[in-house]
Amino acid sequence: GKWVRGTSTLPKVFNNPSSSKLKLTWNGNNQPDGPDTHPSLFAESMGVLMTSSHRFDWTKYWEQQGGDDKLWLWNTLKDSWELDESKKETTLGRIASHEFKNKKTKWKKNFYSRYTTYEERIAHKPEQLSQQEWVNLVQFWDSPEHQIREEGAPPSQGDFFVLSHTSRKTNDALDRQSREYIEKMKELAERDENGNQQPLSDEIYRQVMPRERHGRVRLMGRGVTPTSYFGSQASSHGTTYDRVAELENEMAKMRRVAQEKEEEKQRELDEIKRGFDARYEAMEARFMETLMQRTSLSRMLDEQDEY
């Protein structure tokens, strides 16, 4: 629907009449310098439009956002600021990218990293985001792909096993067998001087996991070999991300299938219940009809006896 500009955020920018646009000065590095009383006001107004419009996908980089949405941002900024077309590329490039990233960095620090469970994180939503936007962002930050990117290096077999066999919502292992393996690996892993868990090395993974039969990776199903899953050596970042994305897709498919089966089972139960209720009502109606007939007959016989 049409986005309506609110009055609760930056009214000094967005409540000005169109005939009174704010002036903006630029320095030699092609960066906005004014207004003098509030140098960051231009970037802040851009951030307000990004969040309030609910047009942008916060799980992606700024460079991946749609061209139409970026054009909308530029045109809306021009409604309140005196902007020359020569500043369009800089505004929608470096300046917008920095503001977009800055927003996510603050949200992650204040509403994600300070909590440990999925439920806690979902319950503490930044007010600028819709519930669905925040759920999408939390699930993105929880994903193995993002966590691997954050670490800056491919994970060990042990760390990857934990990431791929842990529920995002409950932060618990997906099944009993996975939980046993994860607990054993963590018991063997050393802790640093602060008591923090050290990474789960490939050696620890090999100690805990049973020897693979017929070249298959434990708990990954038929046809998945150690080489195809982990690579013959430490994998490059790109292939690691591809494997993570593939695994995420498979897990999503499994969740969808399970959900569809659950919904189908519920529909069958509802249908059985409706059929039972209908039969019960029919039986009750027949019973009442029979009872009334017998009562009527009994009264007739009693009346005949009186005569």
Image (cartoon, rainbow, N blue to C red):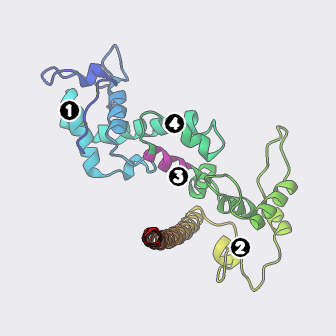
Q: Position of residue 28 (x, y in %)?
A: 32, 27
Identify the residue shown where x is 47% and y is 72%. 294
Query: Rounded to the nearest whole Å, what is the CA distance between mark 3 and mark 2?
Result: 24 Å
Query: Rounded to the nearest whole Å, what is the CA distance between mark 1 and mark 4?
Result: 27 Å
Quadrant (top left, top right, bottom left, bottom right) of the C terminus? bottom left
Residue located beneath label 4 in the image? 107
Tag 4: residue type? Trp
For residue 167, side relative to residue 102 (left or right): right
Disc 2 is placed on an element classified as loop
N-terminal label among 1 and 2: 1
Query: Rounded to the nearest whole Å, what is the CA distance between mark 1 and mark 2?
Result: 56 Å
Residue located beneath label 3 in the image? 140
Q: Residues within 10 Å of mark 2 (few under 14, many from 20)?
A: few
Residue 28 tag number: none
Q: Position of residue 57 (x, y in %)?
A: 40, 49
N-terminal label among 1 and 4: 1
Identify the residue shown where x is 55% and y is 43%. 122
For residue 18, side relative to residue 36 (left or right): left
Identify the residue shown where x is 47% and y is 71%. 305
Q: Residues within 10 Å of mark 4 (few under 14, many from 20)?
A: some
Tag 2: residue type? Leu
Residue located beneath label 2 in the image? 219
Tag 1: residue type? Lys
N-terminal label among 3 and 4: 4
